[in-house]
Image: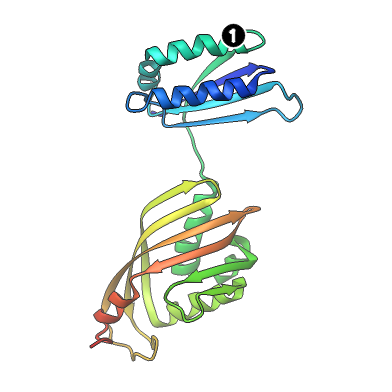
Amino acid sequence: MRFVQVIDCKTERFDDMDRLMGEWVEQTKGTRTATHSLTGKDRSDGSHYVEIVEFPSYEDAMANSTLPETDRIFHEMVALCDGMPTFTGLDVVREEQLNQTLSRRFFHEIAVGGNLDAIDEVFAADYIDHDVAKEEDTVIGSDSLRDDVARWRAAFDFTFDLDRQICEGDDVVTLWTWTGTHKGDFMGIAPTGRQCTMTGTTIFRFKDGRIKEGWWHEDLMGLMRRLDALD
């Protein structure tokens, strides 16, 4: 079970605190067990800071605390604080990656499920689409995405397997495998009835709770070969 430590402190010397944390990151390369760290500043109190540090487990957090660099940094950190920092340990019992969930809605509900009305819920109206397989590789507007989905659905019965998703900041990266049966005209190719697979990567950038921009990289040449459309 993943474990999160919340460190709450007050200091007027955040620049020194920030430098200290940078030293700890540098000095514990290859030995620390922390996987993610985030520091926030209280909007209503400029001297109030909260740091959230994530570990794979409670045991990993305890191992991290025994590092000599951690012990030294802790004492220096206390000296920079206005009073003793407080520490809260949390077992992670539920996590929702909201952008990841919205991204999955596109693949499963919209593309495979055919709920094109959901595009207005998931994508910004001025959505920007980049696709290396298109002649015009940048298109603006969610209506173009609606047309793309409708065109693919008319040409294939297909599914998406989401092999891996990586979330960082406002971006969700999805590595996917597409499997489809060719049932309708596709780029001038008459239906073949063949089942084909294609791999690809999609990056969605989120803004204000909707997908604002997307980048598509798919093995379209491989798909065309499977349809015997290439010499």
Above or below, 32 against 201 in this view is above
Which amino acid, by three-letter code, is at mark 1? Ala
Instruction: Indicate the quadrant containing the C terminus: top left, top right, bottom left or bottom right.
Output: bottom left
The residue to which callout 1 is attached is 79
- Counting every numbered tag in the picture gives 1
Q: For numbered disc 1, what is the local secondary structure?
A: helix
Callout 1 crowding tier (Cα within 10 Å): few <14, some 14–19, many ≥20: few
Estimate the x, y position of residue 151 in percent, counting from the top left: 47, 81
Relative placement, left or right, of 11 versus 147 is right
Instruction: Indicate the quadrant containing the N terminus: top left, top right, bottom left or bottom right.
Output: top left
Above or below, 39 against 140 in this view is above
Estimate the x, y position of residue 225 in percent, counting from the top left: 25, 80
Estimate the x, y position of residue 218 in percent, counting from the top left: 37, 69
Image point 48% across, 14% down: which residue? 73
Image point 33% across, 71% down: which residue? 219
Relative placement, left or right, of 193 versus 206 is left
Q: How is the image coloured?
A: rainbow
Q: Quadrant of residue 143?
A: bottom right
- Camera-nearest residue between 113 and 222: 222
- Camera-nearest residue between 67 and 155: 67
Estimate the x, y position of residue 17 in percent, counting from the top left: 58, 20
Above or below, 100 against 129 in this view is above
Q: Quadrant of residue 160?
A: bottom left
Image point 44% across, 54% down: which residue? 173
Q: Quadrant of residue 49?
A: top right
Image point 43% across, 73% down: which residue? 132
- Camera-nearest residue between 115 and 47: 47
- Camera-nearest residue between 157 and 79: 79
Above or below, 221 against 57 in this view is below
